Image: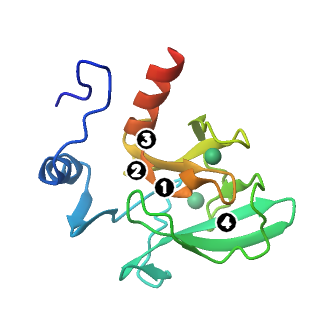
Amino acid sequence: MERFNNEGKLIVPEHAVIAHELKKLGVETAGVVRVKQVFCPNGHQLILRENTSFDNVPGIKLLLHGAHGTEEIYISSVLNKRQRSGGAIFRVGDRLEVRCPICSVQLPVLAPCDCQWDGEYVMLSLDEDPTNRNAVCFCNIWGCPNGDIRLAGEVIADYERNYEL
Ligand SMILES: [Zn+2]
Ligand SMILES: [Zn+2]
């Protein structure tokens, strides 16, 4: 699939094309594009049926630790849609350690976020055999507009183009 046009801009593919590509990664696309499973580095699945739901689908459970305390929260499993519940103790701009709520392992950093707080994208694998691109990621700053989950491959492509790694 062509990723860039002649001007080096990312081509935004048709919904159906995205859906087909994502299906190969085990991502369900019924109406909205969302992930059904994400894993911590130790293989814990963080989308469970009993989790708080957004758009009628269970969210991703995370353990966040910052200067103002530690709290379990949920974020939407729908791609590019910033919704969350919990986290009232955190303030906009707080840098958070994002951890697995089951084993407390810290999620690995994927790439810098270009937000005003110099945040970092942390990643969750889409399967139990993680690679950098087969993952979703989000910024570890509370309140960053990039706090929704997005495909790691797209974030890496943006980063490589902007900073010429
Ligand atoms: Zn874990
Ligand atoms: Zn950010």
Can see residue 21?
A: yes
Q: Distance between the residues labelled 3 and 2?
A: 16 Å
Q: Which quadrant holds residue 47?
A: bottom left
| Amino acid type assigned to the residue bearing label 1 in the image | Gly
Q: How far apart are marks 1 and 2 (CA)?
A: 6 Å
Q: How far apart are marks 3 and 1 (CA)?
A: 18 Å
| Amino acid type assigned to the residue bearing label 2 in the image | Glu
Say if mark 1 contacts mark 2, CB within 8 Å: yes
Q: Name the residue under label 2.
A: 128
159 shown above or below 88: above
Q: Which quadrant holds residue 98?
A: bottom right
Q: Mark 3 points at which residue?
A: 152
Disc 1 is placed on an element classified as loop
Say if mark 3 contacts mark 1, CB within 8 Å: no
Disc 3 is placed on an element classified as helix
Residue 43 - label: 1
Q: Which quadrant holds residue 34?
A: bottom left
| Amino acid type assigned to the residue bearing label 4 in the image | Leu
| Amino acid type assigned to the residue bearing label 3 in the image | Ala
61 shown above or below 120: below
Q: Name the residue under label 4.
A: 63
Disc 2 is placed on an element classified as loop
115 shown above or below 15: above
Mark 2 vs mark 4, foreground winner is: 4
Mark 3 vs mark 1, foreground winner is: 3
Can you give x and y, in whole percent of width and height, for residue 29 in the image?
22, 63
Q: Residue sitting at 69 percent across and 59 percent down?
A: 142
